[in-house]
Amino acid sequence: MQLVTHKKMKGGRLMPWGKGTVVTDTKGYVFLAGNTATSENYDPVNARGGAAGDASAQWRSILTNIKSDLEELGSSLEHLVKITQYIKGPFPDGGVLSSPNFRLDVMDDFFAEHCPKHCSYNNPPPSEVIGVAALAHPDLVVEIVAIAALPD
């Protein structure tokens, strides 16, 4: 399998997301469901439990879940193809990146430890950052969806 992520440049500067990832000779893909950081007793049917911590804690928990899920399903962070981040407001400056719930710093710290090539200052996978009014539980502030390739 070959996975090549192309850098996104603008005005000679590296942007904190990739332009696109070309995957060849893979045996398949893993499409993860949206990951959120819910408490151990979270039960949406019976309205119990909620989010696990503040925005930073939620980001760390979600990224850890994604790493674990990918490994369980035969892939890894190394083979990420694309991520989508849903960020709950507020949006003080009108844009999603102004939300205190958008934590690129936490994502970079996580990737620096577990998969340095995906840090925003290196060569991250393509991604979207989408602002939303609400997620599945009122205390959740971020949800991340990931797609990864399955290596040979």
Image: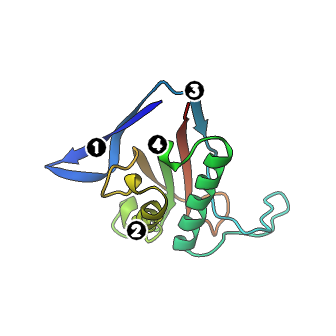
Please tell me whether residue 90 is drawn above or below residue 85 in the rendered image: below
Contact check, label 1 and label 2, Cβ < 8 Å: no
Residue 40 falls left or right of residue 98: right
Q: CA distance from mark 1 to mark 2?
A: 19 Å
Give the residue type that dot 3 points to. Lys
Place of residue 87 in the rendered image (x, y in percent of width and height, measured from the top left):
49, 59
- Circle 4 residue: 82
Look at the numbered discs 4 and 2 and tell me whether their residues touch, using CB distance below 8 Å: no
Measuring 48% from the left and 65% from the top, which residue is drawn there?
89
CA gap between label 3 and label 1 equals 24 Å
- Checking the image for residue 105, the label placed there is 2
- Tag 1's secondary structure? strand
Residue reaching furthest top? 25
- Of the two numbered discs 2 and 3 on the same chain, state the one appearing first in sequence: 3
Query: From mark 2 to mark 3, how far is it between C-alphas?
Result: 33 Å
Assess disc 4: are there few (<14), some (14-19) or many (≥20) residues with their C-alpha within 10 Å of its C-alpha: many
Badge 2 element: helix
Give me the C-alpha separation between circle 4 and circle 3.
Answer: 17 Å
Q: Mark 4 or 3, which is nearer the eye?
A: 3
Q: Earlier in the sequence, mark 4 or mark 3?
A: 3
Question: Helix, strand or loop at disc 4?
Answer: strand
Q: Is residue 83 left or right of residue 62?
A: left
Q: Which mark is residue 27?
A: 3
Is residue 43 shown above or below 79? below
Residue at mark 4 to residue at mark 2: CA–CA distance: 18 Å
Point out the frontmost of discs 2 and 3.
Answer: 3
The answer to whether the residue labelled 3 contacts the one labelled 1, judged by CB atoms less than 8 Å apart, is no
* Residue ID at (57%, 26%): 27
Residue furthest to the bottom in view is: 54
Badge number at residue 7:
1
Badge 3 marks a residue whose secondary structure is: loop
Q: Quadrant of residue 121?
A: bottom left
